[in-house]
Image (tube, rainbow, N blue to C red):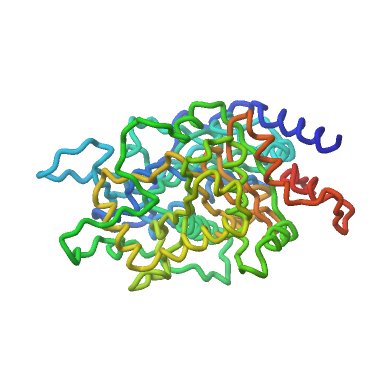
Amino acid sequence: MIENLEAASMERSWDEELPDCRYEQKQPSLIKPNSPAPNHILYLSNIDDQKFLRFSIKYIYLFQNSVAIDLLKSSLSKVLVDYYPLAGRLKPLHLAHEERDEDDEKLQVECNGEGAVFAEAYMDITAQHFLQLSHKPNKSWRKLLFRVDARTFVETPPLVVQINNINNINNVTKLQCGGMIMCTAINHCLCDGIGTSQFLHAWSQLITKAVDNHLPTPFHSRHLFKPQSPSSHLPPLLHPAFTKNHSNTGFSLNRYLQSQLLVPTSLTYTTSHTLRLKTQCEPSIKCTTFEVLASHTWRSWVKSLDLAPSLEVKLLFSMNIRNKVKPEIPKGYYGNGFVLACAKSTVQELVDSNLYYVVKLVQEAKSTLTSDCVNGIVELLEDKIVTTDLSASLIISQWSKLGLEDLNFGQGKPLHMGPLTSDIYCLFLPVVGDPNAIRVLVSLPKSVVSKFEYYMNDFLDTNSVEANGDHEKGNLFCKDVTTIN
């Protein structure tokens, strides 16, 4: 009964509408670099400007205490001297010999110092109340990030920061209790997760003046990911994560999911939980926490959706390639230094097999991403018809090992860190206060959420009790809500 009451409480909080933001000014500020920055065109690699990444990564932070707005603005202006492309604007590269739709055009960055968008607002809510809602994003959170008046993705500024609103900016919201919600929207074509973390920490350390600053100097050039001259006349092989098929025939799981009412589900896995998962594979096979949790999540996701047994399903997950390519990518590179690994199986094989089988698929997918394979993907993406195959795929992005939860603007680390919105993409998120725990967040049709949660927990023995006296199954649910001391 306790678990049912907790679940009901979570359901109510997920639907709760946030109060409207009251803006300090009608129009946001444009924060420019505080000293002259290079003015040039920045080439974006084929990994950077692929269609799959043409969106902004939207982070939300809850801090117990607010930071002076003037200090945030001045430090942002200073850090943009080093990260000046974020103060520029995207620009399509028009090739005279080609006629392409805007979505198919190569993108580049015009480094012109136009500035990052910065909005300020107030909201009538306490930090404690928002913390109780924080385990599951809902649509009203979009208020917290200023919505830029842009007709297309290309027209959207690469960096948006607010102090309370919605869409493509850095949104910092002052609360009744003096706390602060900060939301940022950072263009994914310019930065990956490692790059955004590097930028945010560089910004915060200008305020804290951290003595143990080990952040590298930003490395801007993307030419290391330029296509190499093909070694033969043969076209590059199509990697399983991609497709050239744009037809709408046949069943598309992705289209089906997008047509449904999606609700987020959030489950937290501690070290003891992941160790228990690993015991299902070891000693036959050694595996990492990511490998076993990704495998378990993919299998649970497929089982909950009641798909046709013969349907081929894929797991796509991001893999850092900074140390995999030759020559190695220099430290400080903040562009997209990852590619998608792809594990695939039929539904029947995935459901009928044990976890060991799925982990092996994930490990094999990782092992194929050699330097030659990465170069092949870069060459493949030269063809803008090639897109990520989302038709029957679960995509997992790992945010839990990037240091995002350690951001400190001088008033302490955040009480909460996560995405502003939840989507059909699955996120492995950090857990504030437990560096070894992982929070799994994904949105599913409302009708299958309970099944997904059941399968995600079915490896647990409900009779086992941890040292603190709590049932482990209970610990998986509703443990994202913390209190302010």
Q: Give me the residue at 27% from left, 49% from top.
A: 108
Place of residue 465 in the rendered image (x, y in percent of width and height, measured from the top left)? 87, 54
In the rendered structure, the answer to whether residue 31 lies left or right of residue 106 reads right
Task: Using the image as rendered, state which of residue 308 and residue 202 is in the foreground.
Answer: 308
Task: Using the image as rendered, state which of residue 228 and residue 140 is in the foreground.
Answer: 228
Q: Give me the residue at 62% from left, 51% from top.
A: 296
In the rendered structure, the answer to whether residue 138 lies left or right of residue 328 reads right
- Image: 35 above or below 328: above
- Pick out the residue farthest to the right: 469
Task: Using the image as rendered, state which of residue 123 and residue 107 is in the foreground.
Answer: 107
- Image: 387 above or below 122: below
- Image: 59 above or below 192: above
Q: On the rendered image, what quadrant is the N terminus found in?
A: top right
In the rendered structure, the answer to whether residue 267 lies left or right of residue 202 reads right
Q: Quadrant of residue 367?
A: bottom left
In the rendered structure, the answer to whether residue 338 lies left or right of residue 421 reads left
Residue 428 appearing in the image = yes
Total number of numbered discs in the rendering:
0
Q: Give me the residue at 47% from left, 51% from top.
A: 344
Residue 403 appearing in the image = no
- Pick out the residue farthest to the left: 97
Place of residue 234 in the rendered image (x, y in percent of width and height, measured from the top left)? 19, 59
Task: Using the image as rendered, state which of residue 60 and residue 423 is in the foreground.
Answer: 423
Place of residue 466 in the rendered image (x, y in percent of width and height, measured from the top left)? 85, 57
Place of residue 97 in the rendered image (x, y in percent of width and height, measured from the top left)? 10, 44
